[in-house]
Image (cartoon, rainbow, N blue to C red):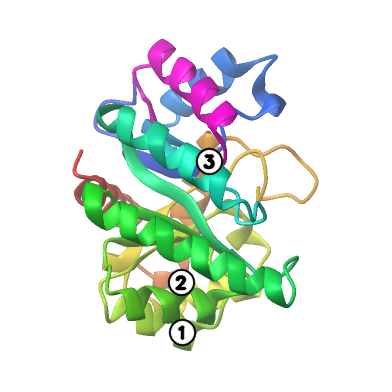
Amino acid sequence: MSRRGGPRFIDVHCHLHDKAFDNDRDEVVERALKSGVEIIITSTLSTQELKKALDIAEKYDCVKVSAGFNPLNFSVLDAEEVAREIKRLRDKIVAIGEVGLDFFYARGEERERQVDIFRFWISLASELKLPLVIHSRSAGKYAIEVLVKEGYDRVLMHAFDGSSGWALKGVSRGFMFSIPPSVMRSQQKVKLVKSIPIEHLMVESDAPVLGPEPEKRNEPSNVVVSATKIAEIKGVDLNEACEVLYLNSKSFFRF
């Protein structure tokens, strides 16, 4: 249903299963397809979310599922339960994530526990040979340090809020970075796009949040906004930029 001959997109990270879309999910998916979005990856944080996301993926051919774990859940037992589900449903899952660190909310010992659980997910991704989608709010440097130390490089840093210097350390390991539509209003995201080679960029919506306008519900169709802004910042042709971003995503997830 995407426009013939027009730009193609993959929304590499959103939360289409979020209750914010319960009343009009059909229309949201339809708008994404009409915008040229071919694949929407919805990213879960618990077993309950995973079940809902898989049901949604059954309904829409364009939806794929990434299974993750809330970094603010410090329960090893909960993490192990989600991991068992991921192993059981391996063929229905395209990535592990989002997982990672959230130092915006976590303090002291909580951070140490986060790092331990993060290592657990890196190990599982390695075992299952799946890509890792990383949440690293206020912890970009620390997340990259842990990833480098653990030695797993098939990594997507989603909505990275750290410095360009640390981002480039990730790039040197082959990490990818996905840019949300909030790049329209975030100088940090603009700097990130300027410094990271386009071969290491993808687009995400992170819907229902991180839209072009604050406080307004975001949608997967808005990855077009991300791609347009990336092309503008990079000073490259829009169609060429869209195709590079699309192929980066296709290659990373092995679609």
Q: Quadrant of the N terminus?
A: top left
In the depicted structure, whether residue 234 falls above or below residue 19: below
Query: Separation of disc 3 and disc 2 at Cα?
Result: 19 Å
Residue identified by numbered label 2: 193
Residue identified by numbered label 3: 14
Give 248 or 111, whichever is nearer the viewer.
111
Is 231 one of the magenta-colored residues? no
Residue type indicated by callout 2? Val
Please tell me which of labels 3 and 2 falls first in the chain: 3
Is residue 67 toward the left or the right of residue 180 in the image? left
Instruction: Name the residue located 42 percent from the left edge and 59 percent from the top edge.
Output: 120
Is residue 57 toward the left or the right of residue 219 in the image? left
Is 52 one of the magenta-colored residues? yes
Q: Quadrant of residue 222?
A: top right
Number of marks in picture: 3
Does residue 119 appear anywhere in the picture?
yes
